[in-house]
Amino acid sequence: MPKLGYTETMKNRISLFGFTLLLAVSVLTLEGCGFRMRGSVDVPINMPTTFVQGADKYRGITPTIKRILRSSGVQLTENPKQAELIIKIYGEKQTRRVLSVGASNAKVREYELNYQVDFGLDRGGKTLVDKQTISLVRDFTFDETAVIAKQNEENMLYKDMQSNAIRQLLQRVQIIMANK
């Protein structure tokens, strides 16, 4: 490997510094205009000790909410009596209905996928939010020649709707906590 001269080494350092500076300015500019990575949710820093009560604490939306809250520094408890805030997940549901069928063969061409989660909030033994529903809908085209690929696409759409519902739910919690 040839030894770099003084000027080549300086050019490399200046180049690295310029790239780092450009990256830093880009990130600050994006943050300044309100850009957020998809899936990121701001959780209130002063959020009290929280218990997440779910219909199924091992599957679905409940463990994901717990993970997000933990990673945001919220103190979670497994005992509802020790919690100042209780997020109640009453249930979630996935459904689909036929939107259209082919004219020539009467086979399904398009589905409507629905995802719904019901939740409520309690604080200090008082109900902050009665049972509310977050509902999301996506259209999904079906191709009988690619059944496995379309099944995977459908699962991804449901997962995306679940992530969107979690963002909406945590944004509502954030707004409520900021106003209380």
Image: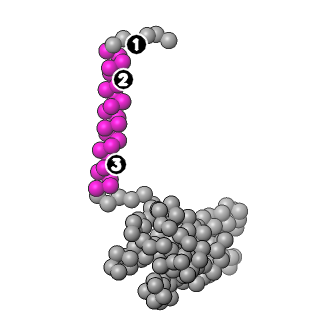
Residue 15 is situated, as x and y percent measured from the top left of the image, at: 34, 28
Residue plotted at (60% across, 73% down): 78
Q: Position of residue 19 (x, y in %)?
A: 35, 35
Distance between mark 2 and mark 3 Cα atoms:
23 Å
Residue 145 visible in the picture? no
Q: Residues within 10 Å of mark 3 (few under 14, many from 20)?
A: few
Q: Which mark is residue 4?
A: 1
CA separation in Å, label 1 and label 2: 10 Å
Please state the total of marks drawn on the protein image: 3
Q: Closest to the observer: 26 or 98?
A: 26
- Determine whether label 1 and label 2 are within 8 Å by CB: yes
Magenta stretch, residue numbers:
7-32
The label shown at residue 12 is: 2
Q: Indicate the amino acid at tag 3.
A: Val
Marks 2 and 3, the one that precedes in the sequence: 2
Relative to 124, does residue 66 appear above or below in the rendering? above
Tell me: 90 left or right of 18: right
Dot 1 or dot 2, earlier in sequence: 1
Whether residue 28 is in magenta: the answer is yes
Cα separation, mark 3 vs mark 1, equals 32 Å
Mark carried by residue 27:
3
Seen in the picture, residue 130 relative to 50 is either above or below; the reply is: below
The residue shown at (66%, 63%) is 152
The quadrant the C terminus occupies is bottom left
| 131 is higher (above) or lower (below) than 136 | below
The answer to which image quadrant residue 13 occupies is top left
